[in-house]
Amino acid sequence: MSIVAARKKFQAYLTDQGLRVTSQRLAILEAAFAQTKHFTAEQLLDHARAIDSSVSRATVYRTLPIMTESALVREVDIGSGEKLYLPATNSTQVAQVVCVDCNRIFEISAPFMEWYGSTVSSKLGLKPVSQRLQVSANCIAFHEHRSCPNRTKQA
Amino acid sequence: MSIVAARKKFQAYLTDQGLRVTSQRLAILEAAFAQTKHFTAEQLLDHARAIDSSVSRATVYRTLPIMTESALVREVDIGSGEKLYLPATNSTQVAQVVCVDCNRIFEISAPFMEWYGSTVSSKLGLKPVSQRLQVSANCIAFHEHRSCPNRTKQA
DNA sequence: ATATGTGCAAATCCTTTGCACGTGC
DNA sequence: GCACGTGCAAAGGATTTGCACATAT
């Protein structure tokens, strides 16, 4: 989604929910959509401040749930202590493959996930809301060296 | 796995790793295997103290990774802030279905997970270590009432 | 005008850690 | 005996929150 479309959608969402369109919220959205890979709340704060220096950490943390609920940003929890975020794509049927050697994260299509969620949930009398699939892996070629060539590139 | 078998396996693992068999570690293992559902570190501490009052929170936190690495306990992170644990079963090919209304957690067989992890990893030049699949869902019949009949039963 | 939003700093929550003492091997 | 394990309390890191001020509508 383009930043233009994202901004439009965000403003519509805020208005629709009776929330206010503030310069800080727009700066944070702008910063999020400038990212090309997964980012943390802290990294988002840095980038948002480059756009609007008045943005505070608290507002970033308060805005992330809004962007997530409006499906503009996707939240990814790989169990690393801090949550990661990503400008949302159309599909929610995406799995993460995380290299434990170098922390690279690949977003991979997993179209069967939704089917599985529905099938299993209905058997339990539940209605699926979302599903997450995550694979942890090592770099094959370099595992024997006990280090990964990409180790310095923290994804 | 019976507690007897678990204790034997744990002692073997500790010895094999050059770690010591202490009364605290045994009490914590005992407490873990007395659980019938998912438990937190804090709950484990409570139960372990009922067996050996000298057990400290620090030791529980230091023992959990040992039990996890020895495959006696399985760690489940549903992104709720605190990690959950479970006496391990044979299969690692298990998905969690979490009811967001009442926090019940169902462990469901998902035999294709391992296959998916291997397939996808090899395409990326990676070797899979583990995979997690989690489905979030609502109680169908009670979602309209905005509450769940099991809400008080924190799983 | 007024209900929301914001920045700041303190608080919270789970988990980890430094240190001096205790204990399995 | 000595290295490893332990309890305690303090530290740590990510996220949340109370409050007084600012601002969108």
Image (tube, coloured by chain):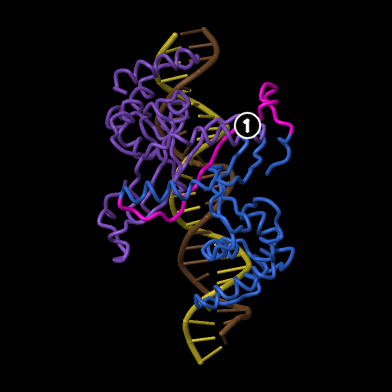
Chain colours: A blue, B purple, C yellow, D brown
Residue D1 horizontal/vertical position (percent)? 52, 7
Q: Nearer the viewer, residue A4 or A81?
A: A4
Residue at 36% across, 39% down:
B107
Task: Identify the subunit bearing mark 1.
Answer: B
Quadrant in the rendering for residue A86: bottom right
| Magenta stretch encompasses residue A140 | yes
Q: Nearer the viewer, residue B114 or B34?
A: B114
* Image side of residue B27 versus residue A106, left or right: left
Instruction: Say above or below: B141 vs B120.
Output: below
The amino acid sitting under disc 1 is Ser
Residue at 29% across, 22% down:
B2
Instruction: Say above or below: A45 vs D25.
Output: above
Residue A55 horizontal/vertical position (percent)? 66, 66
Instruction: Say above or below: A149 vs A128.
Output: above
Q: Secondary structure at mark 1?
A: helix
| Magenta stretch encompasses residue A133 | yes
Residue A128 horizontal/vertical position (percent)? 40, 54
Quadrant in the rendering for residue A143: top right
What residue is shown with label 1? B122
Q: Which residues are magenta?
A: A125-149
Residue A12 horizontal/vertical position (percent)? 57, 75
Q: Nearer the viewer, residue A27 or D15?
A: A27
